Amino acid sequence: MTVDFGGRVAIVTGAGGGLGRQHALALAARGAKVLVNDLGGAVDGTGGSATAAERVVAEIRAAGGEAVANGASVTDFAAVQAMVQQAVETWGRVDVLVSNAGILRDKSFAKMELADFRQVLDVHLMGAVHCCKALWPLMTAQKYGRIVLTTSSTGLYGNFGQTNYGAAKLALVGLMQTLALEGAKNDIRVNCLAPTAVTRMTEGLFPPDMLEAFGPQAVVPAMLVLASEQAPTRTTLCAGAGAFEAANITLTQGAYIGTGPEAPERLLARLDEVRDRRGETVPASGADQGANELRLARR
């Protein structure tokens, strides 16, 4: 099978550098027409300039591809709607969204200002929501869409000093879960990508001898598969240094504890049994949790 984007139109947010730039270049190299979006701000989201997006567009065009630049902030829904309209007016459709825009405002929770917590949520979570909302009617009408949301190991597993970032990134997994269910009838497939890569947001976290191995280009194959015609849906792929894993939110088999005044003590006594991961499942929807509880109660 060939991963090909000939005739497809893609929007990549946060594509002025790092992972987003590599995503945009790779999509264009495989035939996609690409709208390169980047606010051009600093790592913490301050400032802004269209030059970052324009440089990537120039790279794509120099290689023989088609691309246009857009400097909208994903936190501004009207600007995101205008961005989608720009792509439609230029090429007539949008097939792929790679939601990659993000900022960092790291600090331990005790020292973090609520404004910094909200701003990270606004960019990562609401920025993705704005893009999905603006594209959803279009993808529904054309009965085709591929959405890749950028989550993170911090959201999946935690990381000291990143409560805001982790909360936003795991929220994107929740967004994926339901959007994938709602989009299935119209062949809109929604997935998450959890990258491990050296970018300007993470370069200080890697030892010098690992910088090359964890270059952002090593993550790109996962994005291309998740954005492709053959893509799965409701899948979270992790990628870094040429290695790939899948992350799942699972449900253990559990145990029936019952109710009544002594239920907390019975649960505490059997907590290891409840947490036992043998035979755990990946639920097809949220209703599966209730179905499992009903199964246990009827034993």
Image: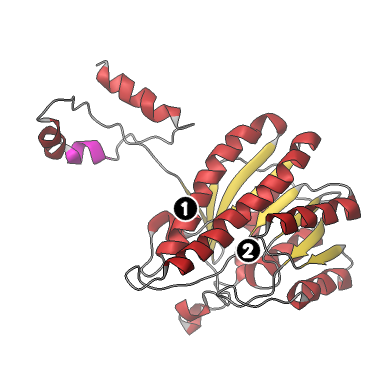
Q: Which residue is mark 1?
A: 170
Q: Mark 1 to mark 2: distance in Å?
A: 15 Å
The quadrant the C terminus occupies is top left
Give residue 194's position: percent from left, percent from top.
53, 57
Instruction: Say which element carries label 1.
Output: helix
Q: Magenta stretch: residue 272 in it? A: yes
The mark tally for this picture is: 2
- Give the magenta part as a residue range: 271-276
- For the stretch drawn in magenta, what is the main secondary structure? helix
- Vertical arrangement, residue 37 with respect to residue 236, above or below: below
Q: Earlier in the sequence, mark 1 or mark 2?
A: 2
Q: Which residue is mark 2?
A: 101
Regarding residue 228, the answer to whether it shows in the image is: no
Give residue 246's position: percent from left, percent from top.
49, 49
Amino acid type assigned to the residue bearing label 2 in the image: Ala
Give the residue drawn at x 48%, y 31%. 285
Query: Of residues 109 and 27, which is closer to you in this image?
Result: 109
Instruction: Say which element carries label 2.
Output: loop
Give residue 191's position: percent from left, percent from top.
59, 46
Query: Of residues 101 and 260, which is closer to you in this image?
Result: 260
Give the residue drawn at x 65%, y 35%. 183
Q: Magenta stretch: residue 105 in it? A: no
Left or right: where 294 falls relative to 123: left
